[in-house]
Image (cartoon, coloured by chain):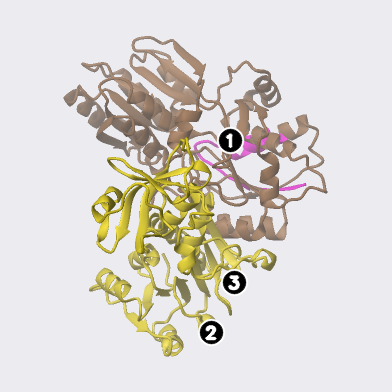
Amino acid sequence: MNENKLILLCGSRIALPVMRDLVFYKQLGVVVIPEHCTEFIQQVQMLLKDMSIPILVVNRKNYVMELEKAVKKYSISIGLMATFTYKLPASVFRLPSKGFYNLHPGPLPGYRGPDPIFQQIRNQEPFVGITLHRVDEDFDTGAVVLFERIKLLDTDTYGTVTTKLSELSSRMVNTLIKMTGFDFEIPSRPQDQALAKYFPRQGASDITIDWKNMGAATIIALMNACNPWNKGAVAQLNNKIIRLLEGDKLAEKLNKPQEPGTIINFTDHAMEIACLNGECLSIRIISVDEGIMSAIRLLQLGIIAGNRFQ
Amino acid sequence: MKLGLLFPLSNVHPSIGSGFVLGLKAMLATKQLQDAVTIIKEPIGFGGGEKEVYQKAEKLLMVDEVDLLIAFVDEKAFELLNPLIQAADKPVLLVNAGANYPLNWVAQPNVIRLNLQHAFSCYLSGTLAAQGGNKQGALVSSFYDCGYLHTAAIVNGFTENGGQMLHNYINNQRYDEGFEIGQLTDFITANPACTQLLSVLDELPASLVYDRLKQYSAAVPIHLYVSPMMLQGAALKNIESGFIHAVDGFLPWHAGLAHESNQLFINSCKEKASIFSLLGWETGLIIAELKPDPQQDWNGDAVIASLLNKKIEGPRGTLTLDLDTQIYMAPLYHYYKSEGTSHATIEPVSDLEKGWKAFTSKSTEGHVTGWMNTYLCY
């Protein structure tokens, strides 16, 4: 595409399509990954095998110094972050002559925070988006260069959304690279602080089903938001943790409403659970300590109709 | 109101830009808006020079501070404009033939699209082809025409409905007396079961292919399912005299439409009424809906919101802005000529919704290669 070399700071598979394209266009100067992302480091090592593209593994103590050195050593003109967990100081993000950018898998300023994919799915947004923005002194606050969105389907999980957004992001980065190749001043728009919303990383209560207050659609959304990284949304029954991974809301309401969380029935394929307002969930796949399995196998673990999730 | 226009040129269809402006001005005059609207034109050649297209768009949005940008460019060149458009936060009307389509169908900020629905028409032709014959087909296209997604659309329409592609015939010859289609006719002769020819060609190569096919007599009748430009002017004349094979296709517009809005358009543009002046005329209709006045809020999404749910009566029929994609939808017309006759029928398509939903249900994955210039600008 052009002569610009890019430093890619990343920590998860969302960066892989971008990496693939940058390799193809011979524009990837160096990849930087935090040392705690061990599986991802192995993935990248395999992807870049025999390609003479350096992979720099950094930690919280040395990353600033290593980044400053790498930008100079590999003649980097563009910086790009994608799910990189450390905050960059100005001494780093001001170094590349054509700027430092971040790919944030959510709309800005409405979905600031470390895991906007989880939050967007859990909040049942009609669309999920990805933003390419300039890096500044804080996380997710820089001026927006490009935003794109896709529809969030009822069947979308955290995993499928990650894949879709990562493919979309590679096209966005291509546009950025092309613009820098033409020596254009990259247009951007400051974020409207009044609309800013920050979502902290989800804690235990955020991934646990609250049967008394969540309707069936909300529970399905939480299941999707926790699939696959948490092996489903957390529910508890008889002191046993059961993660609900896949299921549907039944079209018809119960004739006789039951206490939310009560297992009504085991069909040939699913476990049916009563929800708020007479709604009913049909759960097909669960995850327990014993493995990921069909929900009806809970019968073999002694769980029967009439039991109730707390 | 200040309009910025990225204005295309074409050697093969020289009226593409001038026709568009003629239609636009004629419509504005009809609505007595000619004094309320200033048009600033920036020529962009064939629309394939991304850098030039960007710089002209930047000038119109940032220096001239136009209220609305009309970008007569193709999807690939338009991608580079996206950061500029989002930063400017102005409404943009992307106009073209519709031979390409956005890789992501979901509507994006500030952008609406008006086109001739060429790729969608091809998708419908492919769908129709899968309902006839024995579902075995071959693609017939040219080196130029196959560089746009309308070829993918016709093949997708065919294969998604059970059709099986057996051959891709891409002609790369000069359009002159030496033009021949021997490889295609050899294939048809050797594969008599392959009767469905999914054909995507511009007007001139279409005329040549029709002419050469007149001299070919297939053992089993062949059936052409064609792109909209294969039903234009000179090409159309060629199939309505001495062409024995069956032809099906979809048209965005034809001069014979009897409704009042079309008559007004034809009477205003006279002999210059064409698909290009049609796009200009419809652009004028959209501008008229915005009721250009100094108090208008020209924020991109606010302008688009003001156009949603409005029906606009134009030469093609009723234009409506599809909420999911922010693409203007218009009626299409089914052209059909049966085997062995010269007589063709043109009927409005009664229900486009199902086909449109199927066409736009999947976004394009991965990368797409193709020509950068606007389709028909070469």
Circle 1 crowding by C-alpha within 10 Å: few under 14, some 14–19, many from 20: some
Asked if the stretch drawn in magenta spans residue B8, the answer is yes
Q: Position of residue A306 (x, y in %)?
A: 37, 48
Which residue bears the numbered disc 1?
B15
Rendered view: A224 above or below A27:
above
- As drawn, the chain in brown is B
Q: Position of residue B295 (x, y in %)?
A: 82, 48
Q: Which residues are magenta?
A: B1-25
- As drawn, the chain in yellow is A
- Residue type, mark 3 in image: Gly
Mark 2 vs mark 1, foreground winner is: 2
- Seen as rendered, the residue at the extreme left is B190
> As drawn, is A5 to the left or to the right of B69?
left
Q: Quadrant of residue B166?
A: top left
- Residue type, mark 1 in image: Ser
Instruction: Please give the label number shown on residue A142.
Output: 3
> As drawn, is A161 to the left or to the right of B4?
left
Along the line of sight, which residue is nearer the eye, B334 or B41? B334
Along the line of sight, which residue is nearer the eye, B78 or A254? A254
Rendered view: A94 above or below B121:
below
